[in-house]
Amino acid sequence: MTGEPQMTQSKPKTEQIKKEAIALRTEILRMLNKAGSGHPGGSLSMVEILLGLFDYALKYDPKNPEWEGRDRLILSKGHGCPALYAILALRGYFPLKELATLRKLGSRLQGHPQRGLPGVEIVSGSLGQGVSVAHGMALGERLNGKDTRIWCICGDGEMQEGQVWETAMSAAHYKLDHFHVIVDANGVQQNGPVKNVMNIEPLAQKWEAFGWKAFEIDGHDIELILGTYEKMMQVKGQPTVLIARTVKGKGVSFMAGNHKWHGVAPNDDELEKALAEVGKGI
């Protein structure tokens, strides 16, 4: 497959993606339990976001991760890397068994993404910087005359960082219509609800004021996600942003919407309960 895109030309079936979501959440929970630390809440919230990209929107080749024709996926909210690691393993970038090495000394799977792991484009985790790097990539691809798309996943708490809005202003000025930002708006950050820490709303209207085409949907509705990605790729003359309204800790009742699960891994008993709920596709 080297040199050819792994891109679904027709939309995948919703039921299949729902099954994949269960598998992805299962791997996330298991690796975090094994590691004894990590960020389950913000990883579980972006599962459908990632599946929509890898099953439909992205051009990629796991057999040739550095393929020049690939689209770039930047995980600016680097603490959510267990979700990225899980989908990369499930797509064949590296062996699934390597997920058990999360956060271990010498592992390629550290607590934030790092270069050297196939499928990881940048070191990320200092919030706001991933958006800026993605913007630079988009400018570079424009100058090189390529049609590469740059996708960047951020958190909503990350919208409190000033450089996000510098990037927004610049990308609109240069009309980077191949640059797409996805905000995993789960409403919760490390210290509590985003609206209490520093309110960022109305988020979609703010992006629009900076010159972006904004979309706002339920970030767990896979039909809406696929349809919106399609619309984003059709926009010309301006960058696009998707405000994906999600649930932190989606699929696990005692994690859902709870900021205390920002940095705490489930113990064995909690893992058993969580896997039982995730298996039901809640």
Image: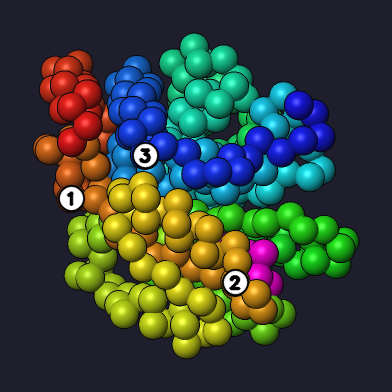
In this figure, which residue is indicated by the disc labeled 3? 14
First of labels 1, 2 by sequence position = 2
Residue 198 is situated, as x and y percent measured from the top left of the image, at 28, 73
> Does 61 sit left or right of 242 as displayed?
right
Q: Which of the two marks, 1 or 3, is nearer to us in this view? A: 3
Which of the pair 226/176 is nearer the observer? 226
* Residue pictured at 81% horizontal, 43% vertical: 68
- Disc nearest the viewer among 1 and 2: 2
Residue extending furthest toward the top: 97
| Residue marked by disc 1 | 257
Residue under the image location 67 percent in, 28 percent down: 62
Q: Is 149 on the left or on the right of 196, as rendered?
A: right
Position above or below: 49 against 108: below
Residue 122 location in percent, x, y? 65, 46
Q: Quadrant of the C terminus?
A: top left
Q: Amino acid at mark 1?
A: Gly
Locate the N terminus by quadrant: top right
| SS category of the residue bearing label 2 | loop
x and y percentages locating residue 20 in the rendered image:
38, 29
- The tag earlier along the polypeptide, 1 or 3, is 3
The residue type indicated by label 3 comes to Thr
> At 47% across and 87% down in the image, what residue appears?
209
The CA distance from mark 1 to mark 2 is 33 Å
Q: Say what amino acid the circle numbered 2 marks.
A: Val
Residue 278 vertical position relative to residue 165 in the rendered view, above or below: above
Residue 27 lies, with reference to residue 172, above or below; the image says: above
Q: Which residue is mark 2?
A: 235
**Label 3 residue SS:** helix
Left or right relative to 217: residue 143: right
The reply to whether residue 131 is in sight is: no
Please state the extent of the stretch shown in magenta in the rendering.
Answer: 176-181
Query: Pointer 3: residues within 10 angstroms few (<14), some, or many (20+)?
Result: some
